[in-house]
Image (spheres, grey):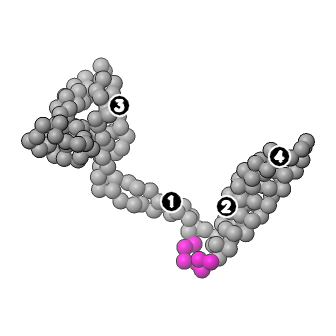
């Protein structure tokens, strides 16, 4: 965590009533900057604990980038297994829905047939989809958005109070 810094993004020299929305980024001031989201979230939590009106606060992620984490090789078998699982869930949903209208214990047979059919069709469709790529993407991955750093921003008329509360709690962590 870095210490709270001097506010930036000074608001225009106008009365607050002249602004139609406080979502205007020129109307916010940065009171602290952090290298990770958890620290920024903890700072807002400290403001909430101090009784500050946190609806006037925003956590802004800057230097955002897309990161793709490669999880492993994707084979035809893995694609078929994934498809079977997805199809089974869809089949379960349909089986339960149609089973509501079946007399007696006939609903159980409908559910079992729907799950099995969904698994077979899901496996087939996912496998064919994998084959259709022609080996151009034979890996499994997960895309995430990550920010380089995070700023805690507060509406300008309340920024000084928020910065003071945050500095007081940083100086007296036991309170």
Q: Earlier in the sequence, mark 1 or mark 2?
A: 2
Identify the element where label 3 is drawn: helix
Q: Which segment is the magenta one?
A: 132-138
How far apart marks 1 and 3 lie (CA) works out to: 30 Å
Q: Which residue is mark 4?
A: 101
Which of pointers 4 and 3 indicates the residue nearer the eye?
4
Identify the element where label 2 is drawn: helix
Q: Which label belongs to residue 127?
A: none
Q: Earlier in the sequence, mark 1 or mark 3?
A: 3
Q: Which residue is mark 3?
A: 45
Q: Answer few, some or many: residues within 10 Å of disc 1's Cα (few below 14, many 20 plus, some between 14 and 19).
A: few
Looking at the image, which is closer to me, 86 or 71? 86
Q: Which residue is mark 2?
A: 82
Q: Earlier in the sequence, mark 4 or mark 2?
A: 2
Q: Is residue 71 left or right of residue 61?
A: right
How far apart marks 2 and 3 lie (CA) works out to: 40 Å
How far apart marks 4 and 3 lie (CA) works out to: 50 Å
Look at the image and tell me whether residue 129 can be seen.
yes
Check if mark 2's residue and mark 3's residue have beta carbons within 8 Å.
no
How far apart marks 4 and 1 lie (CA) works out to: 40 Å
How far apart marks 4 and 2 lie (CA) works out to: 30 Å
Which residue is at a point 64% across and 72% down the rendered structure image? 129
Q: Which residue is mark 1?
A: 142
How far apart marks 1 and 2 lie (CA) works out to: 15 Å
Looking at the image, residue 72 lies above or below residue 91? below
């Amino acid at each position: 965590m870095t210490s709270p810094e001097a506010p930036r993004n000074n608001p225009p020299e106008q009365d607050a009533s002249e602004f139609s929305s406080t979502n205007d980024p020129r109307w916010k001031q940065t009171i602290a900057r952090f290298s990770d989201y958890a620290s920024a979230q903890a700072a807002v939590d400290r403001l909430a604990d101090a009784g500050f009106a946190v609806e006037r606060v925003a956590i802004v992620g800057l230097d955002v980038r897309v990161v793709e984490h490669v999880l492993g090789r994707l084979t035809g078998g893995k694609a078929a297994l994934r498809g079977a699982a997805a199809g089974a869930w869809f089949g379960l949903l349909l089986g339960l829905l149609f089973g509501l209208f079946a007399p007696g214990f006939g609903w159980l047979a409908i559910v079992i047939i729907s799950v099995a059919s969904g698994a077979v069709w899901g496996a087939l469709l996912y496998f064919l989809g994998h084959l259709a790529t022609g080996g151009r993407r034979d890996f499994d991955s997960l895309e995430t958005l990550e920010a380089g750093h995070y700023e805690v921003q507060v509406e300008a008329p309340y920024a000084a109070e928020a910065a003071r509360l945050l500095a007081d709690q940083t100086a007296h962590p036991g309170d």
